[in-house]
Image (cartoon, helix red, strand yellow):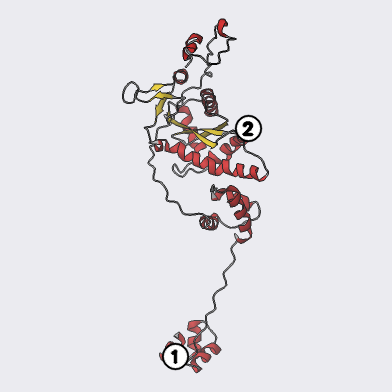
Amino acid sequence: MEIRVLHRRGMGIRAISRELKMSRKTVRKYLRDPDLEPAYRPRAQRGSKLDPYKDYLLMRIGEAAPRRLPATLYLGEIQARGYEGGITTLKTWLAAQYPKEAPATVIRFETPPGRQAQVDWTVIRRGKNRLSAFIATLGFSRYSFVWFTEDEKFNTLIDCHERFFDAIGGVPQTILFDNMKTVMIDRNAYGPGEHRFHSGFREFAKHHGFSPRMCAPYRAQTKGKVERFIRYLKNSFVWPLESRLGGQGLVLDAITANAHVGTWLRDVANARLHAETKSRPDERFEDELPYLLPRGPAWQTLTPAIPANLRDIKVPQHDLSIYDAVGGLV
């Protein structure tokens, strides 16, 4: 023991007491009994500021399962309940509640202001009560737009684009898509990189002056900016809202989601400090806005007129050639 070592070096009881910061009575006790060894008591663990909120957090984790919500969301909720600790303590505790996942490496390419937007659909719920989200992210600023729908049909896609253009007050020069059949019918139909586009979408793009571009097949990560935002949207907005509604026996639908997503985009998503740009998307968007193409009038689709002699015909089973008689509908 250190007391005996110091004593053998010639140090007195008073000096040992000062050196080891213990009472002289304790020093004498161990010097009198050579066989006595100190009994160290385990230190009582200090309570964490997070302790009073762990039951609530476990309840919220259970409500969101199997989805993993971000620590920033939980931090806001427990701060509203009086939590005064930091987010690091919360993140450390949350990490222990989930299995570790290896992060995927994604290479992203930066684009000049106004040059590109990345667009994609994401399915929130399949089946009878389908719920999808249209997401568009500007490449330079990372400024994003979201609109929830009940389908991903052509007319819905056009409507979402018009809403996107309204929201940003302009049109990006190019828009990057994945393999949407409502955008591209046949890849490389006329040669490498020469795709056959959906005729309606081709006219829509021509009307607004932007160029549609397609991701390479099986390389959706080339749309990394919008793909990453999709994960952020689900974790930070969709799953929290869905879990709260589920706790009340309600189901998230497009009307409810659209009623809330605008505020979330304005106050959270586009106002946060972006991890890659180290800037707020809404602030970078102010620099990008002058480079967008002018926002013209909305594109008006024309519904082919049906000949009068065919309007009331009901054909239970017929050859597909009948469609040729109603204006060549595809």
Using the image, tell me which numbered label, if any, was put on residue 241: none
Decide: few, some or many residues near mark 2? Use Cα within 10 Å; few <14, some 14-19, many ≥20.
few
x then y, percent, for residue 294: 48, 22
Residue bearing mark 2? 255
x then y, percent, for residue 51: 61, 61
Identify the residue at horizontal 63%, vertical 60% (top origin): 52
x then y, percent, for residue 196: 39, 21
Q: Amino acid at mark 2?
A: Ile
Give the Cα separation between the discs numbered 1 and 2: 81 Å
Identify the residue at horizontal 51%, vertical 89% (top origin): 27
Residue toward you, 27 or 254: 254
Provide the secondary structure element on which disc 2 rests: helix
Q: How many marks?
A: 2
Residue bearing mark 1? 7
x then y, percent, for residue 106: 39, 42
Q: Amino acid at mark 1?
A: His
